[in-house]
Image (cartoon, rainbow, N blue to C red):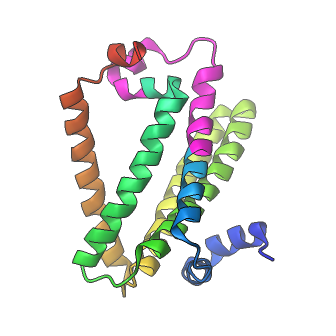
């Protein structure tokens, strides 16, 4: 039987070996998609909770500077975007990784990214709790967790694609992140998303 807390600790201590253990589960694609949508829903809910529960919502200045923040006020829409982004990201990482000489398969990549998203959800709960007590400390913890998450992501992508170094995984992440960012900016521009537009949804 899997000990989830121990698996989480092992992920932090020995990410490469833990990635191999998780990939050995060989889950079917249907189960993985169900898990992906589940973690996307939990992460979207946790990300939106502070905004939805806040009496004042998003500050007008912040909304004007970053209109996409308005999505946090629409948990269902935010879930659709989070889930869609995960699916696109997995596809992009897999095919770009194959183009860079990777030999892994999509099932391995999916299960590892889903596990990281599950850990992220747990971390978000911790940050929310700390935020009620010490908001500044919560911000520092969140920053530290982002760094750790990126480090783990490098190891997991490298393991999934069977890369021989983290540098190749880093190059893959930079290329995919750039392509996804440009694609999202084009989509937002073409669809005319704005703070006002989102407010009418």
Please provide percent x and percent y for residue 194. Answer: 30, 20
Q: Is residue 5 visible?
A: yes
- Which secondary structure is most common in the magenta stretch? helix
149 in magenta = no
**Region rendered in magenta:** 41-69
The quarter of the displayed image where residue 171 is located = bottom left
The quarter of the displayed image where residue 102 is located = bottom left
Location of the C terminus (image quadrant)? top left
Q: Is residue 108 above or below residue 117?
A: below
The quarter of the displayed image where residue 89 is located = bottom left
- Residue at 59% across, 63% down: 31
- Residue at 23% across, 23% down: 192
Q: Nearer the viewer, residue 87 or 8?
A: 87
Please provide percent x and percent y for residue 5. Answer: 77, 66
Q: Is residue 140 visible?
A: no
User: Which residue is at the far front?
Assistant: 30
67 in magenta = yes
Number of numbered markers:
0
Location of the N terminus (image quadrant)? bottom right
Please provide percent x and percent y for residue 80. Answer: 46, 39
Left or right: where 111 falls relative to 133 = left
Q: Is residue 49 above or below residue 170?
A: above
Please provide percent x and percent y for residue 123. Answer: 65, 51
Left or right: where 83 falls relative to 24 = left
Q: Nearer the viewer, residue 28 or 120?
A: 28
Left or right: where 172 falls relative to 200 = left
- Residue at 53% across, 58% down: 33
């Amino acid at each position: 039987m899997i000990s989830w807390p121990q698996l989480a600790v092992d992920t932090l201590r020995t990410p490469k070996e833990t990635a191999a253990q998780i990939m050995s589960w060989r889950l079917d694609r249907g189960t993985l998609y169900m898990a992906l949508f589940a973690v996307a829903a939990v992460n979207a809910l946790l990300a939106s909770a502070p905004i939805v529960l806040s009496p004042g919502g998003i500050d007008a200045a912040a909304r004007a500077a970053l209109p996409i923040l308005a999505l946090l006020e629409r948990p269902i829409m935010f879930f659709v975007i989070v889930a869609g982004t995960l699916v696109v990201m997995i596809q992009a990482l897999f095919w770009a990784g194959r183009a860079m000489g990777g030999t892994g398969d999509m099932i391995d990549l999916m299960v590892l990214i889903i596990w990281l998203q599950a850990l992220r959800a747990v971390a978000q709960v911790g940050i929310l709790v700390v935020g009620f007590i010490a908001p500044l400390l919560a911000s520092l913890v969140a920053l530290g967790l982002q760094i750790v998450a990126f480090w783990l992501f490098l190891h997991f992508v490298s393991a999934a694609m069977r890369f021989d170094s983290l540098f190749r995984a880093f190059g893959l992440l930079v290329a995919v992140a750039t392509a996804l960012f440009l694609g999202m900016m084009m989509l937002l521009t073409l669809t005319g998303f704005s703070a006002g537009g989102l407010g009418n949804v």
